[in-house]
Image (cartoon, helix red, strand yellow):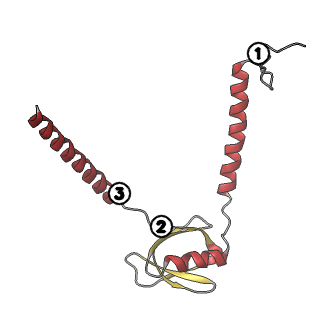
Amino acid sequence: MQIASHRTFPLNFDGLRPLHIVRGIAAVLAVVLVGNSVALAAGRAPDPVKLKQKLTIRGIGNSLKVTELDGTTVSGSLTAIRDDAFDVTLKKATKPTTISYSQVARVDNVRMSTGTKIGIVVLCLGVAAAIVAVIGVKMEHSL
């Protein structure tokens, strides 16, 4: 009876150079990523029933951003939800825009403005500087 002195890997890569393996992995990854981007780019309308439920949960008066199938983006507040469409009132507008469920590619939350993001970062940096200053003063007094 022979006892194997070492284990062998089930896949034999001895005949392949490492560069071939890397190229093969890169090719598979490229195909997967291209397929994924094509699937995401084919904007199809979501189910109208689910979209209506999503808008109902969000609630009238809340801000939203609607991207239509043709690429048009509408940002404003939700003012009405009907069986076949919903209304969005644009900022600085008085008359609502009616959007049919079949025209919608996606509905998102309105994101923070750049000024708000800068303010949050400055506030965090200020708090961090204050904490460092307090720790520095405490350590100086303890020496």
Q: Are marks 3 and 1 in contact (CB under 8 Å)?
A: no
Expressed as whole percent of the image width and height from the top left, the position of residue 93 reads 40, 80
Residue named by callout 1: 6
Mark 3 element type: helix
Task: Out of 78 and 120, give the one closest to the viewer.
Answer: 120
Q: Mark yes or no: residue 6 visible.
A: yes
Q: Of the residues shown, which amino acid type is indicated by label 2?
A: Asn
Residue named by callout 2: 109
Mark 1 element type: loop
Q: Residue furthest left?
A: 141
Name which quarter of the figure residue 45 lies in.
Answer: bottom right
Separation (CA) of disc 1 from disc 2: 58 Å
Q: Tag 1: Cα neighbours inside 10 Å, few (<14), some, or many (≥20)?
A: few
Label 3 vs label 1, nearer the camera: 1
Where's the N terminus, which quadrant? top right
Residue named by callout 3: 114
Please name the residue shown 43% across and 80% down the image. Answer: 61
